Image (cartoon, helix red, strand yellow):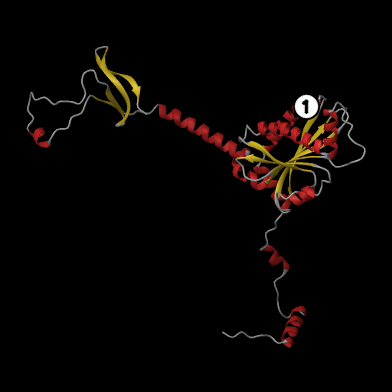
Amino acid sequence: MSEKVLSQDEIEALFSAMSEGQIESDDEEAVSKDVTPYDLASQKIRWLENFDLLDEVHDKFAGLLKSVLSAKLRNSVEADYISTEIHKFGDFIKDFGKPTAFVIFNMEPLSGSAMLVMTDNLVFSMIDCLFGGSGTGLEQTRDFTLIEQRIIRKISVDILNNLERAWEAVHAIRILIRKTETNPDFLRIHTPDDLVMSAGFSVIGNEFSGNMYVCIPYLMLEPVKHRLSSASIQKSEAGLKQNEHLKELLKGSFVSVSVELGRSDVKIGDVLNLKTGDVIWLNNGPSDPVSVLVEKRLKFQGVPGVVKDKRAVRISSVVL
């Protein structure tokens, strides 16, 4: 099918007619009715609502962090959970300079890499406390030495062990440290546009203060989202209560229970010839256990007997 192509004169005439109002065009109000606004801020809030139990994890971690740092540094240390925010990974990283202690770790069985971040002033103060100082830190910022990097790794092991403990109430994880880094430009664990959740913690000692962050990619938490939402927990608890109610109702229901004393395979011809006084041999003897059936299903083994002049069966074993 051939299509008609407008000439330049026809195009100019069309634009002129539209500008003079001779040709109606869709107004902005009509177009706006078909457009759904997309608010990135509200999306972030909705994502955080899916992981609201993380606040409990982070509160517990802050308490454990206070204990481990106070014992490790031999200094009175306060650790408080600040908040959890969602960023793009590139936006999160650009707030840190060099040097900063970045500890990359895995949270098995979750796939992906998370990160513990400690600011330089906090690291230098903790190292000073470990060597008997008060934690005053350094006046001029410099790179971490190899010895200081080893100390950072050892401190991180204790910190992340307590993060693992904080997660126990929600989902069992095993934290394994992959590597440490001091330059944010060398971090290649995520793309700049990947969404990450960062939990901030303030650490305050007698002579120092600093911040610490736990950065976890959003996709890493997606498989356990159902465990981290209070709504899903409440729904699960409601289901358990309903199941308990059904169990109570079922306890009052009646079922048929029968006892099978024995069996025998007999030909149809022999059955037709049976008469009074004939004997049918059973596969069970007087001392053999009998089968107890519930709704025609074998559930127990028993021993036949008499109780208060009534025939009875004593349960001897349960059939799984």
In which quadrant is the C terminus drawn?
Answer: top left
- Horizontal side of residue 200 vs 137, given as left or right: left
In the picture of the structure, the residue carrying the numbered disc 1 is 72
Q: Position of residue 132 (x, y in %)?
A: 86, 26
In which quadrant is the N terminus drawn?
Answer: bottom right
Near-viewer residue (301 or 231): 301
- Tell me the residue at 34%/22% (across/down): 317
- Horizontal side of residue 125 vs 5, given as left or right: right
Note whether 285 is above or below 91 in the view shown.
above
Q: Check the image and name the residue furthest to the front.
A: 146
The number of callouts visible is: 1
Q: Position of residue 46 (x, y in %)?
A: 67, 47
The image quarter containing residue 16 is: bottom right
Q: Check the image and name the residue furthest to the top.
A: 308
The image quarter containing residue 235 is: top right
Q: Position of residue 285 (x, y in %)?
A: 20, 21
Note whether 173 is above or below 259 in the view shown.
below
> Residue type at mark 1?
Lys
- Horizontal side of residue 97 vs 293, given as left or right: right
- Tell me the residue at 59%/39% (across/down): 232
Q: Position of residue 123 (x, y in %)?
A: 82, 36
How crowded is the residue under tag 1: few (<14 C-alpha within 10 Å), some, or many (20+)? some
Note whether 43 is above or below 248 in the view shown.
below
- Horizontal side of residue 6 vs 149, given as left or right: left
Element at label 1: helix
Near-viewer residue (299 or 196): 196
- Tell me the residue at 52%/36% (across/down): 239
